[in-house]
Amino acid sequence: MQSSEKHFGMNCNYIFNSMDNRQTILAISPGTSLLGFAVLRHGVLVDYGVKAYMWKWSKGKSLHIANSVKKLTEQYAPETVVIKVADIASPSKNVELIVAGIEEMAEKKGAKVFKCALQDIKQACCNGEDTAEELYATLMKQYPELSFIEKLGLNGYFYYGKMFEALGAIIYYLSEI
């Protein structure tokens, strides 16, 4: 897990609303093997990373993922939780369960829930460019501390892809409020 304290800049293609700049936003891009997250507090990227769950799907794995999300919500007490959801019409049932669990946990903590798809994120961050590489490049330009991922090659992009989606989801959320 990497941490950062980079101010949220004005040079990307999104609307930055200073009223909601005062809140803490936790974004999550869930998957059954990797869960990416990013936290923006008062306009500053304070944490980001990937949680890996590389074992076979089971109730125990589901509980482990839920516990990881619970720890993030307790650690950061976000006012808003942004969830990247699948673009496809019929996402994995296990991912749907994870999303439902995140929504329920956020609502119990009194956080607003906002959902977006990858296409929404790409539209907000890089004018709808269809490649993940364009999204990664845009976010690494905005947050140079993420450029270490570029040095890892394809494996780094694969592993950190969910984290980039989560960070992009925050930018999309801010462009919509």
Image (cartoon, helix red, strand yellow):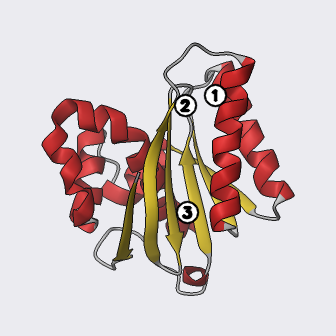
Return the mark for residue 95: 1
Q: Secondary structure at mark 3?
A: helix
Quadrant location of the C terminus in the rendered image = bottom right
Tell me the CA gap for discs 3 and 1: 21 Å
* x, y percent for residue 71: 67, 52
* x, y percent for residue 163: 42, 47
Task: Please tell me which residue lies in front, 19 or 47.
Answer: 47
**Local crowd size for mark 2, using a 10 Å CA cut-off: few (<14), some (14–19), many (≥20):** many
Q: Secondary structure at mark 2?
A: loop
Q: In the rendered view, would you say 87 is above or below 140? A: above
Mark 2–mark 1 CB contact (< 8 Å) = yes
* x, y percent for residue 51: 49, 39
Task: Please tell me which residue lies in front, 69 or 136.
Answer: 69
Confirm whether residue 15 shows in the render.
Answer: no
The type of residue carrying mark 3 is Tyr
**Local crowd size for mark 3, using a 10 Å CA cut-off: few (<14), some (14–19), many (≥20):** many
Indicate the quadrant where residue 125 lies. bottom left
Q: In the rendered view, would you say 134 is above or below 5? A: above
Task: Please tell me which residue lies in front, 122 or 40.
Answer: 40
| Dot placed on the residue nearer the N-terminal end, 3 or 2 | 2
Task: Please tell me which residue lies in front, 98 or 75.
Answer: 75
The type of residue carrying mark 2 is Gly
| Dot placed on the residue nearer the N-terminal end, 2 or 1 | 2
Q: Which residue is mark 3?
A: 173
Return the mark for residue 16: none
Q: Nearer the viewer, mark 3 or mark 1?
A: 1
Residue ID at (46%, 62%): 47
The type of residue carrying mark 1 is Val
Q: Nearer the viewer, mark 3 or mark 2?
A: 2
Q: Which residue is mark 2?
A: 31
Tell me the CA gap for discs 3 and 2: 20 Å
